[in-house]
Image: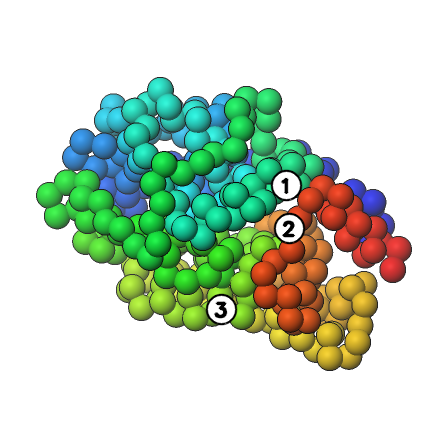
């Protein structure tokens, strides 16, 4: 890593988006490894899971939805607190938005670190924040739940909004449509993309994946990557994500036991990770943050330290210079 800038600052290639129907009521808005959004079109309202990063970017998704329905986009669900997932929420105000729904854990993370996360994410990955200046401020939920809540969006169309456990963050939220066996996983599951684990609960993540597997989803919209549109692809996505997070944490535990510094821990982790994951979307971008958090967790730091733009740069410098 000879560059002094984040791997993603130079990533300027605009990704092609796809809006595809997965079942009678469920759709996936995917973007070649950029953050995905899930859409549920009910009898008289639309729900989206994740908002895109800016209100201007939200207009692209709204345009796709309006090609198939004119129903109000009443519900916005936040899968977690990261800026790239939540800061586009104001773009849906003119579309009938009534509720912004988040878990208690997500609400707590917005309170604790939402502002720092916003600035940090933007500086790391500016391409993901098209028309950054259109963001009016932090996105605050209007409805906060603890473990789960249910919306009925039509006759027999039960939509379960659930926190089944921590993983990518402490407040991860999924949207589950039992009658159609479609799951919107947020970044708890990835496909063909690195898991960003800078704010993760790595130790608990595999148990949360077990809880997702137990739902019996036949289709999953992951946080990044293509929609998993068969039971076989769903199983593969769950296994891939588990492999990523368990290999990462195991490597970090070894590095800590051996008394390695961060630069040494990075090199040690790469030996296990690169052969399996080097080719996937945003791997080089994520790995420094992933290793830093994994080393923290392996050292007993249970609650992730807050990333600031300054801390990002310090970490990057430490990895460059040793």
* Label ID, residue 27: none
Residue 107 in view in this figure: yes
Which residue in the protein does label 2 denote? 306
Marks 3/2: CA distance?
A: 19 Å
Marks 1/3: CA distance?
A: 25 Å
**SS for tag 1?**
helix
**SS for tag 3?**
loop
The residue drawn where x is 43% and y is 70% is: 207
The residue drawn where x is 28% and y is 64% is: 216
In which quarter of the view is residue 220 placed? Answer: bottom left
Q: Marks 1 and 3: which is nearer the front?
A: 1
* Label ID, residue 116: 1
* Residue 257 locus on image (x, y percent): 73, 79
Which residue in the protein does label 3 denote? 204
* Residue 311 locus on image (x, y percent): 74, 48
In the image, 26 versus 115, the foreground residue is 115
The residue drawn where x is 74% and y is 74% is: 255
In which quarter of the view is residue 47 placed? Answer: top left
Asked if the residues shown at circle 2 and circle 1 are in contact, with their CB atoms under 8 angstroms apart, the answer is: yes
* Residue 118 locus on image (x, y percent): 60, 38
In the image, 162 versus 221, the foreground residue is 162
- Image position of 253 (left or right of 192): right
Within 10 angstroms of label 2, few (less than 14), some, or many (20 or more) residues?
A: some
- Image position of 300 (left or right of 165): right
């Amino acid at each position: 890593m000879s560059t002094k800038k984040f791997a993603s600052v130079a990533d300027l290639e605009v990704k092609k988006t796809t809006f595809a129907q997965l079942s009678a009521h469920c759709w996936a808005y995917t973007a070649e490894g950029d953050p995905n959004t899930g859409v549920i079109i009910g009898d008289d309202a639309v729900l989206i899971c994740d908002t895109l990063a800016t209100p201007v970017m939200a207009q692209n998704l709204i345009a796709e939805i309006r090609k198939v329905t004119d129903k109000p986009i009443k519900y916005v669900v936040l899968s977690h607190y990261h800026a790239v997932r939540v800061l586009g929420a104001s773009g849906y105000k003119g579309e009938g938005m009534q509720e912004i729904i988040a878990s208690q854990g997500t609400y707590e993370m917005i309170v604790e670190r939402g502002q720092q996360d916003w600035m940090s994410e933007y500086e790391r990955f500016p391409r993901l924040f098209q028309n950054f200046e259109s963001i009016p401020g932090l996105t605050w939920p209007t409805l906060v739940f603890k473990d789960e809540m249910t919306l009925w969006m039509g006759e027999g169309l039960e939509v379960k909004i659930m926190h089944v456990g921590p993983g990518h963050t402490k407040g991860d939220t999924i949207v589950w449509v039992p009658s159609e066996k479609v799951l919107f996983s947020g970044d708890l599951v990835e496909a063909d993309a690195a898991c960003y684990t800078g704010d993760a609960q790595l130790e608990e993540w595999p148990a949360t994946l077990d809880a997702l597997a137990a739902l019996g989803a036949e289709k999953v919209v992951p946080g990044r990557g293509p929609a998993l549109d068969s039971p076989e692809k769903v199983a593969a996505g769950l296994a891939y994500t588990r492999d990523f997070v368990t290999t990462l944490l195991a490597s970090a535990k070894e590095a800590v036991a051996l008394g390695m510094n961060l630069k040494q821990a990075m090199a040690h982790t790469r030996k296990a990770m690169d052969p399996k994951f080097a080719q996937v979307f945003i791997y080089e971008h994520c790995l420094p943050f992933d290793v830093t958090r994994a080393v923290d967790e392996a050292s007993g730091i249970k609650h992730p330290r807050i990333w600031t733009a300054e801390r990002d740069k310090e970490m990057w410098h430490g990895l460059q210079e040793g």
